[in-house]
Amino acid sequence: MTQATLKIPAQPFVTIETADHLSEHTGSHSLAVFVSSDQKIKASHSLSGLSESVAEVFKLTSFAAGAGELQMDFSAPVKSVDQIVLAGVGDKLMSDTAIQKLASNLISYADKQAETLSLLVDGAFEPRSLEVFILSLLNHTYRFEHFKSKPASRKLAHIKLITHDAELSTRLNYLKAVHTGQSMARDMGNLPGNHCQPMDLARYARCLAKEYPKLLKVKVIDENQIEKLGMGCFMSVTQGSDAEGQLVILEYQGGSKMSDNPVALVGKGVTFDTGGISLKPGAGMEEMKFDMCGAAAVLGTFKALCESGLPISVVGALACAENMPSGKATRPGDVVTSMSGQTVEILNTDAEGRLVLSDTLTYMKQFNPKLVIDMATLTGACVIALGHVQTGLFSTDNELAAKLIEAGHRAGDKAWRLPVEEEYQELLDSPIADMQNIGGRAAGSITAACFLSRFVDYAPWAHLDIAGTAWVSGKSRQASGRPVPLLMSFLSDIED
Ligand code: BES
Ligand code: MN
Ligand code: ZN
């Protein structure tokens, strides 16, 4: 029995709002002023007394204002402000990484120093950078403290964006929706394997639908039905585990009626990946609790859709299973028949993501989607190729690929395209079945994508390999909630 007791939706820890002037505050109040490397204040929004006070400060210090650097610890003569923080934006257009470092430094500063952090944002950033910065600020306020007896102390409770731009508050609502969805994806991802089994993911999806009864419907296909539907590939993964596999279907209807051609989102939800009989080595295996981050991102995107109310129709699927070795587990060399009728020789039971996804992709055909995007922590090879910066993007459709790259760029959640060409397909030839489930060491991420492509013959399709981007590894291991921002940016741009 599992005991998932996490409260959803993820509650934001910190409020954020726009304001057109600095107001009085109870509690400590810091004002962040953005400064470029030539020691110019980057602000089109003047505050009386501000430039003099900063000028005074500049006499006392030699703040280089490199991108992301902070300078603080002096008292501020500006009314109602206890402390001014100079925030360096460098001397050229900041990279997304530099923007994120700046946001991270500001939030750790405020967690120690300020209940309210006001930021003089007008004129400090390019419009796109400002949105990346705001989302990053919000994301740095995220904490996963569900299993801590005592939450860490934090001062920061309110963020205020001081601006004269009335449109920013509309954009802020969108960014809050993205942040809430992303936080939910992170919460799901951060849950360990004993607290997040396929049934738990199904339960969280049902909870979400209860919260937004007008916008969201959820249907859960249990393991019996998965078997009855002829999903031999899906079954080959889930059969080794005592936890029942679940296929969770979500339908979001933000327009007046469900479109005849919704967008389809499919996520890999392997709640723990031991590798199965092709058992993984022990070191670092704990991070395979994150192997459901694709499903978590789909669920988080639905949360963000419900919060933002985008006027479109989206259908989602979470392919949830646990990959375990047992007396019932698939053996290397076993042949199974997929729901599509194609047969698969399973040479490696650790290549399980593509197996649960293949039958799920076949299942999505009935929704007649205008396009399908799947996301999965699919291959270690993708981490070798792209590291932890960009998500791997694979598509047989140039237009869809271009739109996803552009959407990722806008959101500061980038993806890089790798090929899924015919020439790679033969690596999947099997001597006894229609295909084998691995292609060998060469081009491991590409052959995985090739495998998936064989199960989507009904709509333009793209695959996002988030193995390197869905979580941060090591001592500070935690889910990132990517690619929720990319998907929301893509979906914002789509016609129903
Ligand atoms: N979930 C893993 C992929 C993974 C590994 C993601 C490490 C992030 C970090 C996936 O199920 C897997 O095991 N893939 C194998 C495929 C291989 C057997 C062809 C891999 O990448 O080693
Ligand atoms: Mn695996
Ligand atoms: Zn896996």
Image (spheres, rainbow, N blue to C red):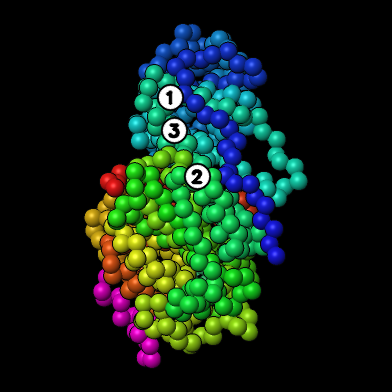
> In x, y percent, where is residue 474?
60, 56
Residue at mark 3 to residue at mark 1: CA–CA distance: 17 Å
Cβ of disc 1 within 8 Å of ligand 1?
A: no
Mark 1 and mark 2 in contact? Answer it, CB < 8 Å. Answer: no
Residue in front for this viewpoint, 317 or 211:
211
Q: Closer to the N terminus: mark 2 or mark 3?
A: 3
- Above or below for 476 versus 465: above
Q: Amino acid at mark 1?
A: Val
> In x, y percent, where is residue 77?
56, 10
Q: Amino acid at mark 2?
A: Tyr
> In x, y percent, where is residue 484?
44, 49
Residue denoted by label 3: 173
Cβ of disc 2 within 8 Å of ligand 3?
A: no
Q: Nearer the viewer, mark 2 or mark 3?
A: 2
- Above or below for 424 versus 94: below
**Which residue is drawn at the image coordinates 67% and 52% (left, top)?**
5
Mark 3 and mark 1 in contact? Answer it, CB < 8 Å. Answer: no
**Which residue is drawn at the image coordinates 57% and 21% (left, top)?**
30
Quarter of the figure with residue 326: bottom right
Residue denoted by label 1: 121
Q: Nearer the viewer, mark 1 or mark 2?
A: 2
Q: Nearer the viewer, mark 3 or mark 1?
A: 3
Magenta region? 421-437
Q: Closer to the N terminus: mark 1 or mark 2?
A: 1
Q: Amino acid at mark 3?
A: Asn
Residue denoted by label 2: 212
